Amino acid sequence: MANILVVDDDKKLTLLVRGFLEKEKYQVAEAYSGRMALDAIKEAKPDLIILDIMMPEMDGIEACKRIKADKDTKMIPVIMLTSMSNVKDKVQGLNAGANDYITKPFNPEELIARVKAQLRIKFLENELLRKEEVEAVVKMGIATAHEINNPLTAIIGNIELVLMKKENISEENVTNLNSILESALRIKEIVSKMINITRVVETEYAQGKKMIDIWKSG
């Protein structure tokens, strides 16, 4: 279930919103200022943020700008909480990058509906991004395979021709050539897998980095 960060200096309101969200089985974290929200995002890793505008230390407009300016958090949907009568706040919130807004006092059903709508949009955006990543990997795999295949085929063919005349080659060199041929055939198998990638399956590499597991991505 999605994680939601609720940010408001009114702790009673925050508790109320938490109750509505938890009834829908969402995980909820809280913060009470814009500055606290920026720290809480690192810890909670929210899928969505409900952010009040009027807060001490750092208001919601500035917090939203910073969230949307950070490459690690810019895709998190933000729903701004605004005063019903203050149109200027709504405009500023949307200009700061907010995805939606809801006015106070709010209807709980409307709040949940807007949360679900933004989470659904986020899910679809993630699916589209994933599809684009797969397409990019497939294109790279095909391009790399094309560049490798021709010289690799020539290497394998020449080694096989040499081995056909192995009576003129020492036993040690035959062993070495067979080892080279085995490695070349292994590369050809990898190239074939690269062409047939249909999804991206990641695996751990080293120093916290990940790589594509081509054996599971085909």
Image: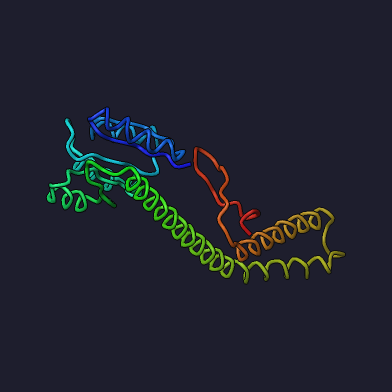
Quadrant hosting residue 215: bottom right
Q: Is residue 152 left or right of residue 69?
A: right
From this view, report whether residue 27 is shown above or below residue 137: above
Percent of width and height locating residue 84 = 17, 46
Who's the residue at 56% across and 42% down the image?
204
- Of all residues, the one furthest to the right in this rendering is 167
Percent of width and height locating residue 173 = 78, 56
Percent of width and height locating residue 213 = 60, 51
Q: Is residue 43 left or right of residue 102?
A: right
Task: Choose between 144 and 45: the one closer to the eye.
Answer: 45
Q: Is residue 149 left or right of residue 209?
A: right
Task: Choose between 110 and 210: the one closer to the eye.
Answer: 110
The quarter in which the C terminus is drawn is bottom right
From this view, report whether residue 48 is shown above or below residue 9: below
How does the figure colour the protein chain or chains?
Answer: rainbow
Percent of width and height locating residue 135 = 50, 64
Task: Choose between 166 and 91: the one closer to the eye.
Answer: 91
Who's the residue at 62% across and 72% down the image?
150
Who's the residue at 58% across and 70% down the image?
146
Q: How many marks?
A: 0
